[in-house]
Amino acid sequence: MSDPGGFGPDLVEVFGPSQQDGGPELVQLLTPEGERVHHDEFDHDFSAEELRGFHRDMVLTRRIDTEATALQRHGELGIWAQLLGQEAAQIGAGRALRPQDYVFPTYREHGVAYCRGIDPLDLLGLFRGVDQGAWDPKDNNFGLYTIVIGAQVLHATGYAMGMQRDGVVGTGDPDRDAAVIAHFGDGASSQGDVNEGFIFAASYNAPVVFFCQNNQWAISEPIERQTRIPLYQRALGFGFPGVRVDGNDVLATYAVTQAALQRARDGQGPTLVEAYTYRMGAHTTTDDPTRYRMSDDLEHWKLKDPIARLEVYMRRNGLVDDQYFADLKAEADELGHHLREGCKALPDPQPMSVFDHVYTEMTDELAAQRDGYRAYLDSFEGAGH
Amino acid sequence: MSTTQKITLAKGLNMGLRKAMEDDPKVLIMGEDVGKLGGVFRITDGLQKDFGEDRVIDSPLAESGIVGTAVGMALRGYRPVVEIQFDGFVYPAYDQIVCQVAKMTFRSQGRSKMPMVIRIPFGGGIGAVEHHSESPEAQFAHTPGLKVVACSNPIDGYWMIQQAIACDDPVIFLEPKRQYHADKAELDESATPDPLFTSRTVRAGSDATLLAYGPTVKTALKAAEAAATEGKNIEVIDLRTLSPLDMAPVFESVRRTGRAVVVHEAHVNLGMGAELSARITEECFYSLEAPVLRVGGFDTPYPPSRIEEEWLPDLDRVLDAVDRSMEF
């Protein structure tokens, strides 16, 4: 890359060549080959139980994704936003949360939802077209899926500002201090709302972790269309730290997110975490990645599979046996059954329900419109509703 | 014993905001320059000094950021009152207002509420540069999930802002900026205000009905006075609420007078007047002596300020419409 304008060193000189492997800044605790490595800043000791927990969570999350994709193919869902390949990023981030923390998801955070105790069946309603979010955000401190790209990053920042006003930041009480995590993707990083969220959070030192899953693709647009520098480096311009973590390494993602959340809970303000990962599947079930990306890429990333590398590590170190895998398979099968049968049994909403909850109390003019529609329906002979 | 004082609209809003903040510690104010400066129109004057920087928040200059973070605060249990500095600057926040604020209650099936007030100084007549004199109300009234109100006088300013803050639904609160420091009125804080989402007949008449809100209420009243000198007896209704509309007093009036003229500063095409006209036609068809007429801004961008008084509906254009209605 040349420097046509004479404005100093070119970008390659400053940031190094384009690094498909995430570059030297990538925080990693478990290599794609399943080797445990150590990191000066973000190391963490994991018990065998914790490792098995991460593995189980990722396997079940992948099963949710597989089942939902199949349900879409069978016509039971209108669409499904797939997360294949992003299990480690989501489980690492999800397991780093405390109950009092609050999550603002995109529409792809199925693994994080699972970590928060949301019944995976509840995730399907939105994609089946029977509701727009079946859970109460207050029950699990997990917001509703947000479709408009990046909008929730501002909500997260405002929620964090509310936490500051509630006195639940920096008290030193681990059961009290709380933080917010805002999920978004590499495409959303171009949105004004995300950048405004960064500015507000920096200005007020809000306890929020900006968790960007850089899966390299915004539908058909590659990361190069969104940014000319590694995304985590943008944080510097906003005045808070940014970290690039191997998003296919659940251990590193957990360690980095946990540290960022703790920083926020302690009152030290926002952090940008860029989880460097890859969207193995399509953007959604209506997308066709063969039109815009090379299968070589996919093959390259298959070697970095987040589940396989942890499995290799656990087997090599004798942390799991055949019974563990048999039990896990049975659990996954049960989850699959729950999703398949549950999805088909999800009732369609009543057409008259569209008038409910537009306002906290129905306005007279909306009630009149509802009554008019009811009278219209009743006007048909044999109207039996 | 009640005490009264003479106040401007700016003062009424300021007092109403203060009262709401005293009554409910969850009420927060956020916007550009709302702190030390007290807002560019001084509506929040002195509030940061008395309630602190945590409750009266000077924001970065980003309207989507203001409204978007207010969504998060509302989800956390606060009642944010955000100030958009001028009408024409609301558009960067339009996505958050229409896609998030308006839909959150519906999306969550009532589990999450959006008790937010978005204050917007609106309308023209202050000799301002571009983007400072607009009337975007129809864009919000067209959006299900939002409520839209417009105050026209100091007393309503005092009460309506408190009622809007107490409302569990998001309210777009329109303030006629030309009136902020204009007329004074006598405020009795012990009085019982009309409910927020109601229209009010402000002048009784029998020959035609003028429908106005915000800045055009004053114009309509002046027109009615002028018409009276010509022997025409004009009724004036201050709509006050634009979504939901409170049509009962309007229908009652138009059935008596047989004639209706809507007056607003906003562009006529697809404006509030179009909706009012449709509803009046549906409900009062056999009582109408003339089609419902509309007087408003022309379907052009807001003009340079030297010609804004020609562009805005004034007394003569309102009277002209009344004459056309009477002659029909």
Image (cartoon, coloured by chain):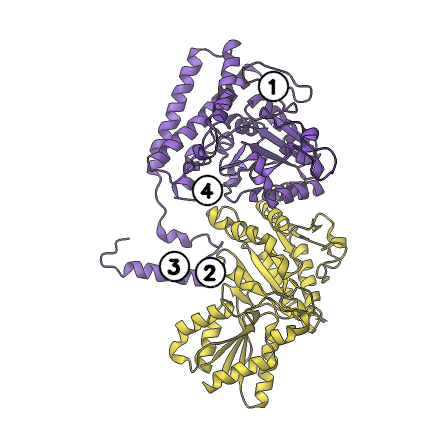
Under circle 1, the secondary element is loop
Q: Chain of mark 3?
A: A
CA distance for labels 4 and 2: 23 Å
Which amino acid type is shown beneath numbered disc 2?
Thr
Q: Quadrant of residue A285?
A: top left
What is chain A's hue in the picture?
purple
In the rendered structure, find residue A29 and report the number of the disc placed on it: 1
The local secondary structure at tag 4 comes to loop
Q: CA distance from mark 1 to mark 3?
A: 58 Å
In this view, the residue in front, A70 or A216, is: A216
Q: Are marks 1 and 4 on the same chain?
A: yes
Q: Position of residue B318 (x, y in %)?
A: 56, 80
Q: Position of residue A167 (x, y in %)?
A: 68, 40
Q: In the image, which disc is placed on residue B160?
A: none
Check disc 2 and report the residue beneath it. A363
| Any part of residue A100 in sight | no
Residue denoted by label 3: A370
Please state which of the two labelled residues, at mark 4 or mark 2, is closer to the viewer.
4
Chain letter, yellow: B
* Label 1 packing within 10 angstroms: few (<14), some (14-19), many (20+): many
Disc with the residue nearer the chain's start (1 vs 4): 1
Closer to the chain start, of discs 2 and 3, is: 2
- Please state which amino acid type lies under the numbered disc 4: Gly
Mark 1, chain letter?
A: A
Q: Residue at x 64, y 27 (%)?
A: A17
On the picture, is A354 further left or further right than A206? left
Q: Are marks 1 and 2 in contact (CB under 8 Å)?
A: no
Q: Is residue B316 left or right of residue B248?
A: right
Q: Secondary structure at mark 3?
A: helix
What is the chain identity of the residue bearing mark 2? A
Tell me which numbered mark, 1 or 3, is placed earlier along the sequence: 1
Distance Cα–Cα, label 2 vs label 3: 11 Å
